[in-house]
Image: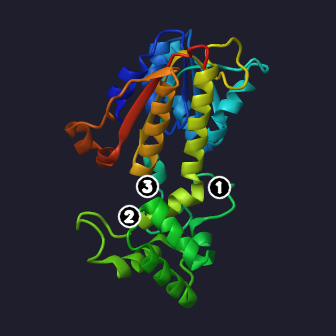
Amino acid sequence: MLPREVVELLAPKAGETYVDCTAGLGGHAALVGPLVGASGRVVLNDVDDGNLGKAAAAVRRACGDACPELVTIRGNFAELPHALGGLHGGQGIRADMVLADLGFSSNQVDDPARGLSFRLDGPLDMRLDPSLKLSAADMVNGLPEAELARILRDYGEERHAGLVARKLVQARKETPILTTARLAEVVRSVLSGRSGPASIDPATRSFQALRIAVNDELGSLQALLAAVLRGASGSAGRGTGSGSWLGTGARVAIISFHSLEDRLVKRAMEEVASRGVGEVLTRSPAMADEPEQRANPRSRSAKLRAVRIDGALGV
């Protein structure tokens, strides 16, 4: 997603450390790896263990004999700054570049077993991390109507959240809602003719809302952004202790896909600048050009923002 723009904003240099919070299939890391070279380091993080192996293989293919040091970490990126501090025998790793692509890799979206999409019928799961306690089916079939409505309203920005929640509760009393097709059918039965442009499936917002809730996506993003703010304020100090996981001059780029995420990212980056510890590199978000949108329709909603960490003292 936005490969040219990511590389331009991160501006990789030989010997630097690149941290990919959402490695996916390794597309971005494979672009950055050859630029940091054998003297550099690439840290790959993902909740999907299978994707970590694929991402590492993609970097090795791209770099050949000049492959940087590769570090793989399985986990939620909310915990990544802490995990970096425990590497290298507790000496920690400081990042020169950080990327968080908040979208999902194509193999996840296209896998019916994940339950992320209504295009292919599958179990109503939506968990990117299988160890998470609650699936989307658990929420849809177990939460009170008021809580379902809140999730649909707050995370999906669904104008008819109350109507959808009421219908879900009615439908689950007859038959548990256990598949993506069934969930989409119930939502469409309420919203057909009511919700948005004809080109957008009426179930889209409800699926987004439940996915965000199941994976606590906004909570994870807020934790990462808070760590960026702490790291920015601490990057002028020495060592790699708490609050200084970002090196002075580090570039942090985040790709978001809906307004809830983008508002959080924009606000955090503006705060970095207002504190005098960094500079926003994107006055307005970078977006995919027409050729990329044609080649990858999912890129149409992608927004890329970036900030450089200056680490000014006296904050």
Q: Is residue 46 left or right of residue 27?
A: right
Q: Which residue is mark 1?
A: 130
Q: Quarter-wise, where is residue 45 in the image?
A: top right
Q: Is residue 60 left or right of residue 189?
A: right
Disc 1 to disc 2, C-alpha distance: 23 Å
- Color theme of the render: rainbow
The N terminus is located in which quarter?
top left
Residues under numbered marks 1 and 3 in contact, where contact means CB atoms less than 8 Å apart: no
- The residue lying at 44 percent from left, 14 percent from top is 35
Q: Nearer the viewer, mark 1 or mark 2?
A: 2
- Residue 206, compared with residue 176, is above or below; it is above
Q: Secondary structure at mark 2?
A: helix
Name the amino acid, label 2: Thr
Q: Which mark is residue 140?
A: none
Q: Which residue is mark 2?
A: 204
Residue 46 visible: no
Name the amino acid, label 3: Asp
Name the amino acid, label 1: Pro
